[in-house]
């Protein structure tokens, strides 16, 4: 039986959704990288990737991998994107304080 | 690396990109924009993105009207491949004090004299426009249907891309470290990527524009101040206009994407470059928002951030060539409104740089107005 190692490309195609919150595909991310948007923060601002409820928990790493691959760099050479609070979504009313607490 | 340029613009926000585009459109060659991070990484990309004609000084009304009329045709004029997402849902500005109501009536008179289609509304009429508002908290409101908002990232890219097509060079990740002045005139700019010799420098550095002025030995009377914003999860469209109050300290809009963006100022904010987010902002913002727009209490906040205003003594911009240093041009001091004024900034600065008559009478916005005591205070700022 032939054994071969699996590569990322066996799983991903241009139609693969990279940012689930905003439904951005790998193809769209690759197009932006080709156009010169070469950091997660720039791609986020122009495409909304990473701006949804999960705040980029899934897509941030995947986008960084794509940039690294395109530029022939390792992940550690890339600039980390900005992580913004709050850590998890929080309802506005929770912040209103304890007036209604018994 | 040694380079030459005819004009070097410091700052890759929307103001710098708009000035570059207008210069190139007029045929100026060798224009370089220097940006310390990436396009739109500073105040432009952090702003509330609203644009309004409803101002309290004649100058600001005229600057805003000119700019909004440009945004209406910007996709075509800049031949942008995406969309700047300009939505004219209007601004509903509410008054909660008697003093404010008096000011608003004065503002309306001024706005009408300039052809701005704003109108007076009773609380009941205001509620018809923003149905989820608690109208018992307000005395009256004004509304202008031409106001609205657009996407700051796309608007800036539209200018940057159009400028590049016309030959402008944009140097990102490049920091200005000095400005060389000889015999009272600019001769070049020191950067982290080498020296650029140029007879003309434009200071469009937003929150950092005072520091850039200092490099040329030009004192610019403004200070940076952090302003914070939060954004919620997206929900179905329920609010057409921007909702705003100066006295209650809030602006709040729903974007075409469905999320609500809101911000407020803080009277105790230190005058520095801090752009970290604070927990107290979330609490104060939530309190103000839920009092005035109660149904929004159920929304999840997904993110918060901050950016810098650069505030002048009269809260109007500075457009001029410095009287101290020849070839040093100033386009800053927008006091939180540089994004919405960008189209007019680009046009009048290119005219000032080329020594042409200006499209609007912006000589009143010369920096020396502060020495002459000729400033006109803008009352309508959050």
Image (cartoon, coloured by chain):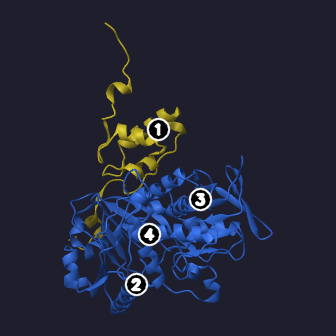
Q: Earlier in the sequence, mark 4 or mark 2?
A: 2
Residue B221 lies in what quarter of the image? Answer: bottom right
Spatial CA span between label 3 and label 2: 32 Å
> Do the residues under discs 2 and 1 have CB atoms within 8 angstroms?
no
- Parent chain of label 4: B
User: CB of mark 3 within 8 Å of CB of mark 2?
Assistant: no
Residue B38 in the image, given as x and y percentages of width and height: 52, 52
User: Mark 3 = which residue?
Assistant: B27
Which residue is label 1 attached to?
Answer: A67
**Chain letter for yellow?**
A
Where residue B91 appears, as percent x and y from the top left, is: 32, 75
**N-terminal of the two: label 3 or label 2?**
3
Mark pair 4, 3: CA separation: 25 Å
Which of the two discs, 4 and 3, labels the residue nearer the N terminus?
3
Spatial separation of the CA atoms under disc 1 and disc 4: 33 Å
* Chain where mark 3 sits: B
Q: Nearer the viewer, mark 1 or mark 3?
A: 3
| Front residue of B26 and B113 | B26
Which element carries disc 3, helix, strand or loop? loop
Q: Position of residue B110 (x, y in %)?
A: 40, 88
Evaluate whether label 2 is on the same chain as label 1: no
In the image, the chain rendered in blue is B
Camera-near label (1 vs 4) is 4
Can you identify the residue that label 2 sits on?
B114
Left/right of residue B332 with respect to residue B95 in the rendered view: right
């Amino acid at each position: 039986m032939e054994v071969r190692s699996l590569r990322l490309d066996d799983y991903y195609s241009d139609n693969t959704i990279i940012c689930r919150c905003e439904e951005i595909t790998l193809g769209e991310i690759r197009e932006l990288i080709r156009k010169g948007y070469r950091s997660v923060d720039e791609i986020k601002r122009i495409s909304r990737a990473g701006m949804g409820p999960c705040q980029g928990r899934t897509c941030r790493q995947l986008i960084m991998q794509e940039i690294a691959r395109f530029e022939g760099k390792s992940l550690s050479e890339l600039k980390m994107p900005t992580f913004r609070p709050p850590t998890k979504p929080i309802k506005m009313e929770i912040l209103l304080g304890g007036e209604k607490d018994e | 690396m040694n380079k030459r340029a005819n004009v070097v613009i410091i700052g890759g926000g929307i103001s710098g990109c708009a000035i570059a585009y207008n210069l190139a459109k007029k045929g100026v060659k060798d224009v370089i924009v220097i940006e310390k991070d990436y396009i739109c990484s500073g105040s432009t990309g952090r702003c509330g993105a609203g644009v309004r004609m409803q101002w309290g000084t004649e100058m600001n009304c005229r600057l805003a009207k000119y700019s909004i009329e440009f945004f209406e045709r910007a996709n075509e004029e800049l031949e942008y491949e995406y969309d700047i997402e300009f939505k004219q849902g209007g601004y509903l500005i509410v008054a909660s004090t008697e003093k404010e109501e008096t000011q608003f009536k004065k503002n309306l008179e001024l706005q009408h004299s300039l052809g701005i289609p704003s109108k007076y509304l009773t609380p009941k009429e205001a509620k018809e426009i923003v149905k989820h508002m608690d109208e018992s908290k307000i005395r009256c409101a004004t509304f202008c249907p031409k106001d609205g908002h657009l996407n700051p990232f796309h608007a800036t890219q539209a200018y940057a891309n159009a400028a590049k097509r016309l030959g402008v060079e944009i140097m990102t990740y490049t920091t200005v470290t000095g400005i060389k002045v000889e015999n009272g005139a600019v001769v070049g700019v020191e950067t982290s990527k080498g020296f650029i010799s140029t007879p003309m420098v434009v200071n469009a550095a937003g929150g950092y524009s005072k520091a850039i002025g200092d490099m040329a030995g030009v004192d610019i009377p403004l200070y940076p101040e952090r302003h914070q914003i939060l954004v919620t999860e997206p929900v179905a469209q329920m609010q057409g206009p921007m909702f705003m109050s100066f006295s209650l300290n809030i602006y709040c809009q729903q974007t075409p994407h469905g999320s609500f963006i809101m911000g407020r100022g803080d009277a105790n904010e230190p005058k520095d470059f801090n752009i970290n987010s604070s927990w107290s902002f979330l609490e104060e913002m939530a309190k103000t928002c839920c009092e005035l727009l109660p149904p929004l209490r159920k929304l999840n906040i997904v993110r918060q951030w901050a950016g810098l205003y650069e505030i002048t003594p009269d809260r109007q911009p500075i457009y001029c060539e410095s009287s101290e240093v020849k070839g040093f041009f100033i386009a800053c001091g927008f006091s939180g409104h540089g994004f919405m004024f960008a189209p007019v900034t680009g046009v009048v600065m290119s005219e000032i740089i080329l020594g042409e008559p200006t499209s609007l009478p912006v000589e009143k916005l010369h920096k020396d107005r502060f020495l002459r005591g000729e400033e006109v205070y803008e009352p309508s700022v959050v």
